Image (cartoon, rainbow, N blue to C red):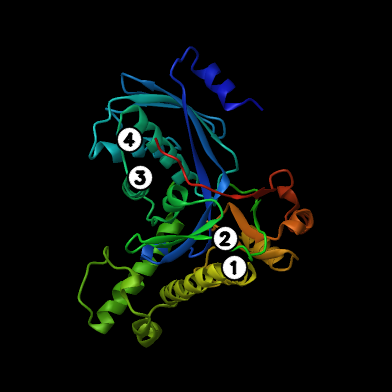
Amino acid sequence: MQSIQEVFEYNFPGEKEVLTAFCPYRVCPIGAHSDHQYGLVTGLAISEGIHIMYAPTDDGEVSLHSMNIFGDHTFNVNNIGKAKKNWADYVRGAVMALRREHEVTRGVRAVVHGTMPIGGLSSSAALTVAFLSAFCRVNSIKLSKQEIIEHALWTENSFIGVKCGKLDMSCEVLAKKDRLLYLDTMDDSYELMPKRSKMKPYEIAIFFSGLERSLMASSAFNSRVDEMKSAAFAMKSYAGMDGSTFADSRLREVPREVFEQYKDRLPDNWRRRATHFYDEFDRVKAGAAAWKMGDIEEYGRLVFESGYSSIYNYETGSPELIKLYEIMRNTEGVYGGRFSGAGFKGCCMAIIDPQYRESITERVTEEYLKAFPKLKGKFSSHICDSADGCKFE
């Protein structure tokens, strides 16, 4: 396979000022599906991610080539228009986000290389953050980490149309190697909790189902968000709480005792989504306490619980991802695991004991391909370390 430098020189020969950026992917062991409800989350950036090599353009031209996704794209920072429903929308959105408050006159010619298949590791947020870094650099724009997160979130919510929260971009910006990000998405307060000296060693395993998830907005994802917001709005009405619009309603605003009092009045799917939120909130707090104590086994047990709730209360997880989850639960050396991301396709992540690395990979691969033999050659496994978040000039 050609290097990103070779591909860049082929597509954009003769460039003198060549720059690079890297944004890691992320995993969320506990806290999934709760950030858009202002919940608590834990997360880690991993040692794989999105690399871009780019050169500035003075006329505002943006020319993009991906080493992973078919289709090159070109636009100008002064004429972006609406989303086109292709991967370059995340780059267009990054420019639009910046132009709300800053002057953006220079574009980039860029090659993009993602080091893993798409699906479950928040490649979309990583792509957005990497290009926010690039456009800031070539246009001499200085942003804080929190501003980068907010710009990336605006891109997802307002330009792309995905009703996600800020978990993904927060992990990819704030994370530190061997430190667990413990984030309150309601007020953006966070803690980077170090690995205790007595904690058993761990690595992060990624198992790709062989089914890639689209980068674009998912109606199924957005419907789950609306179900949670509907539950919150209904319970506030039942309890006579101060009114707010449906758009502004979040489960974090509804105390658990209100949920317990009125949950039987909710439609079954709304009640299940809310159950996941409240139980996950407690799991995140328990998981953070276990990490602080250096108890990776208890943290892993809670990761498995989180995965179970995502499947049976949040009701996501394709047959392939559910099978991977079940295999991981019965594999020695896996502290904990769950599907990663929205759960419609993509991958599962696991926190594993490194001494079982080979046997875990062999068993998961064998059992999974026994169940889905047609995915041989598409299924893949990867072992990663935790990593620092994206660095900015």
Residue at point 64% right, 66% down? 198
Instruction: Name the residue that disc number 2 marks.
Output: 195
Instruction: Tell me the amino acid under the disc marked 3.
Output: Ile
What separation in Å lies between label 4 and label 3 (alpha carbons)? 12 Å
Instruction: Tell me the amino acid under the disc marked 1.
Output: Gly
Instruction: Tell me the amino acid under the disc marked 2.
Output: Lys
Mark 3, secondary structure of its residue: helix
Instruction: Name the residue that disc number 3 marks.
Output: 148
| Residue 56 percent across, percent down from the top left | 38, 22
Q: Which mark is residue 95?
A: 4
The answer to whether residue 322 is left or right of residue 181 is: right
Q: Report the residue that reaches farthest toward the bottom.
A: 261
Q: Residues within 10 Å of mark 4 (few under 14, many from 20)?
A: many
Tags 2 and 1 touching, CB below 8 Å: yes
- Image quadrant holding the C terminus, namely top left
**Which of labels 1 and 4 is toward the front?**
1
- Image quadrant holding the N terminus, namely top right
Q: Is residue 360 visible?
A: no
What separation in Å lies between label 4 and label 2 (alpha carbons)? 37 Å
Q: Residues within 10 Å of mark 2 (few under 14, many from 20)?
A: some
Q: Which mark is residue 294?
A: 1
